[in-house]
Image (cartoon, coloured by chain):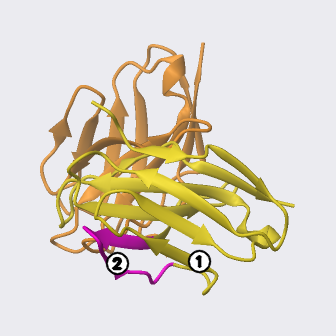
Amino acid sequence: GAGVSQSPRYKVAKRGQDVALRCDPISGHVSLFWYQQALGQGPEFLTYFQNEAQLDKSGLPSDRFFAERPEGSVSTLKIQRTQQEDSAVYLCASSLGASKETQYFGPGTRLLVL
Amino acid sequence: DAKTTQPPSMDCAEGRAANLPCNHSTISGNEYVYWYRQIHSQGPQYIIHGLKNNETNEMASLIITEDRKSSTLILPHATLRDTAVYYCIVRVGNNDMRFGAGTRLTVKP
């Protein structure tokens, strides 16, 4: 079946621009996660949704980062006034249930801020 | 901070078993050990997970020591396509997973 998909796969933004990254989780998956992966590092947790509720946003690095999942399926990660340090791969993952289920990752969106 | 320690890199000959170690000496009784791998320019791929007992699936085997302070991921017959970064993760809670730097496995012909 279809896995987690993300779009766009690559995004180049000028410093100060706003960007929106989309995640389509596996159909029926309750939980959705966003991670940020800097070059040469492991992914770092940003935020977590259970259905439409954002239950944990402790990993969001600043108030320029905002995520939503209004209907409990597709999610959007928005970064306002992008900075060069926002350049990274943004990964989305989903899991079937709400508790310690295996997470399945999408291919990521590579963001480059110039 | 990640709760696991892994060697930064390892090499393995094609066709041989790859044994990837992981230390997790502070693991709690109800925390699972998960393994993922990440091939260049792709998202992390789930491999296997376990709590106490050894586990095996079509991809790999997971050996967890009796005291649960360490584990080993075994790829029984490594191929060139197994070249990737392998992450050993202890689930901190219900939500996020704490990835460390992982082990870069290079399978050589």
Relative to A67, B91 lies left or right: left
Quadrant of residue B30 within the rendered picture: bottom left
Q: Colour of chain B?
A: orange
Which residue is rendered at x = 33% and y = 23% of the image?
B76
Q: Position of residue B24 (x, y in %)?
A: 36, 65
Which residue is rendered at x = 16% and y = 72% of the image?
B29
Mark sitting earlier along the chain (2/1): 2
Q: Position of residue B22 (x, y in %)?
A: 40, 54
- The quadrant the N terminus of chain A occupies is top left
Please, which residue is most extreme toward the left here?
B53
Relative to A85, B17 lies left or right: left
For disc 2, the neighbor class at 10 Å (few under 14, some 14 to 19, many from 20) is some
Question: Separation of disc 2 and disc 1 at Cα?
Answer: 13 Å
Find disc 1 in the rendering and name its residue. A65
Q: What amino acid is found at the position of numbered circle 1 in the picture?
A: Phe
Q: Which residues are magenta?
A: A47-59
